[in-house]
């Protein structure tokens, strides 16, 4: 748990560090303000998002001789919350908050041996209370990290069995406690020329880890623990925020521009770039397996780290707008599981390679800070995997998938606290990829057993931070002093 939380915190903290640009040579100066920005005060928010969970499932070996599995789930949710911020210096904001997520991130408990059955629990609610710390990359744009306590609820579910008549089994509701780390960007809607005093928008990534807990299997009046369940939940959300500023001044800059141009040349985002970094990802894999009882459907899960390299070309086609094309690759260890139905044995393939080709469009929230969305083609590969030692003759072959992705992120110059690094940038990016279903056969190389038909449909959700070198970055670094 400590390694996961510390690693995720470091990943997200890089975003805030990169956004904390305090650069020496001034090519831009702040425009006159009709009201001083003030982030101190209470706020409320509401919005929606998408998430995945991956759970390490262990059935009690004294009851059922079944290998550990990694099951998963995914789905949409709504979110509401509120908090209090304190602007304790010209550029730094700290605060506390609480929120709730209500949704239907539906997944699987796998009990294919000996019941040839699955249950379909849903992550129906998550509650969190925590603190955040942010840096004002512009007077009305805050880049922040957050962390704290989290509580998750998973619904009970009736087992769906291939055996006729089916067993009257169900699982009990689960309540779990844990921790979360995250980060995001919040900005007033005035960034887009819309005058909306007090209204802001925030987009936030969050990763939560929960403690292991037994899940209960019931049949009529009989109950008892069957195994344990340890979930990790990763979400992305966008919310509207209303800030009740404590001293009556809207926490926004009035409709005046954020910057006025000084005599020096403006920044230029047009040109080629290369990037390299790392990240963390979750996946779900909709598995359908044929057996003597018929098809058995299950939603497996996966999680792990990866490295990424890439490059592209951007074109600044307007003072505040940038478009471009790019290609990148991810190399890693996002490990999932596959269930050999009827045997209680599992294999552990890895999503070790993904690459993408796409386009992006972005808006300059400051001269050297680009907020963008992207999308395009994606390809994923999963390694060959053998089943448990007593079934080594059965192998899941290597598989390749084609699909699409959508994502977005923030990229900014790397001149931090007066450290001059011309051409060097940093970006943090979220991405969701969906791949087409593919059928494979679990094969017995000896030829004794015929191939067992499997089909898989993966969804992969990642967050990454990369260093970027821009070959064309013209002139001196860009300054935005407040």
Image: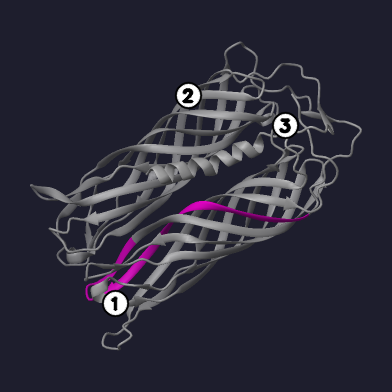
Residue 427 falls within the magenta-colored stretch: no
Residue 184 in the image: state x and y as whole percent. Answer: 56, 37
Label at residue 96 = 2
| Total labels drawn | 3
How far separated are the C-alphas under marks 1 and 3? Answer: 58 Å
Q: Quadrant of the C terminus?
A: top right
- Please name the residue shown 40% across and 57% down the image: 302
- Would you call the spot at circle 2 few (<14 residues within 10 Å), some (14-19), or many (20 or more)? some
Question: Residue most toward the front?
Answer: 419
- Please name the residue shown 17% across and 64% down the image: 65
- Would you call the spot at circle 1 few (<14 residues within 10 Å), some (14-19), or many (20 or more)? few
Residue 426 in the image: state x and y as whole percent. Answer: 66, 46
Mark closer to the chain start, 2 or 3: 3
On the image, numbered disc 3 is attached to which residue? Answer: 22
| Mark closer to the observer (1, 2) | 1
Q: Relative to residue 120, is residue 5 drawn left or right?
A: right
Compared to residue 342, the image places residue 107 above or below, namely: above
Mark 3, secondary structure of its residue:
loop
- Please name the residue shown 51% across and 57% down the image: 306
Main secondary-structure element of the magenta-colored stretch: strand
Label at residue 392 = 1
Mark closer to the chain start, 1 or 3: 3
Mark closer to the chain start, 1 or 2: 2
Question: Residue most toward the top?
Answer: 247
Task: Give the extent of the magenta segment.
Answer: 272-298
Q: Relative to residue 187, is residue 265 drawn left or right?
A: right
């Amino acid at each position: 748990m400590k390694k996961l939380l510390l690693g995720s915190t470091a990943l997200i903290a890089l975003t805030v560090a990169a956004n904390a640009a305090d650069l020496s040579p001034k090519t831009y100066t702040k425009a006159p303000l009709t009201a001083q920005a003030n982030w101190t005060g209470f706020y409320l928010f509401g919005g929606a998002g998408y998430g995945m969970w991956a759970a390490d499932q262990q059935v009690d070996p004294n009851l059922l001789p079944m290998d550990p599995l990694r099951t998963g789930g995914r789905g949409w949710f709504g979110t509401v919350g509120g908090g209090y911020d304190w602007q304790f210096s010209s550029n730094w904001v700290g605060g506390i908050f609480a929120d709730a997520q209500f949704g239907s991130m539906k997944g699987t408990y796998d009990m294919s041996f000996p019941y040839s059955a699955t249950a379909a629990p849903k992550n129906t609610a998550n509650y969190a209370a925590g603190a955040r710390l942010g840096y004002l990359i512009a007077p009305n744009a805050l880049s922040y990290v957050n962390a704290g306590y989290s509580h998750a609820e998973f619904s009970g579910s009736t087992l769906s069995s291939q055996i006729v008549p089916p067993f009257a089994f169900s699982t009990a509701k689960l309540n779990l406690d844990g921790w979360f780390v995250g980060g995001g960007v919040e900005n007033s809607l005035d960034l887009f020329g819309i005058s909306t005093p007090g209204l802001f928008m925030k987009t936030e990534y969050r990763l939560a880890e929960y403690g292991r807990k037994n899940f209960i299997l019931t049949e009529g009046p009989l109950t008892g623990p069957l195994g344990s369940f340890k979930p990790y939940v990763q979400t992305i959300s966008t919310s509207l925020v209303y800030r009740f500023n404590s001293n009556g001044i809207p926490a926004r800059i009035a409709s005046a521009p954020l910057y006025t141009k000084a005599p020096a040349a403006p920044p230029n985002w047009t040109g080629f770039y290369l990037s390299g970094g790392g990240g963390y990802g979750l996946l779900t894999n909709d598995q359908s397996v044929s057996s003597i009882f018929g098809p058995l459907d299950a939603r497996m899960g996966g999680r792990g780290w990866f490295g990424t390299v890439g490059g592209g070309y951007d074109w600044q086609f307007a003072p505040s707008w940038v478009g471009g094309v790019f290609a990148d690759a991810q190399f890693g260890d996002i490990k999932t599981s596959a269930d050999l139905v009827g045997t209680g044995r599992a294999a552990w393939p890895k999503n070790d390679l993904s690459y993408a080709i796409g386009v992006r469009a972005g808006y300059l929230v400051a001269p050297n800070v680009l907020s963008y969305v992207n999308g395009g083609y994606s390809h994923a590969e999963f390694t060959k995997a053998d089943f448990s030692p007593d079934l080594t003759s059965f192998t899941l072959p290597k598989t390749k998938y084609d699909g699409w992705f959508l994502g977005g992120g923030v990229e900014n110059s790397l001149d931090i606290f007066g450290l001059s690094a011309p051409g060097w940038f940093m970006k943090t990016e979220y991405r969701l990829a969906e791949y087409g279903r593919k059928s494979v056969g679990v094969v017995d190389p000896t030829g004794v057993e015929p191939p067992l038909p499997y089909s898989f449909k993966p969804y992969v959700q990642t967050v990454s931070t990369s260093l970027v070198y821009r070959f064309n970055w013209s002139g001196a670094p860009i300054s935005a002093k407040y």
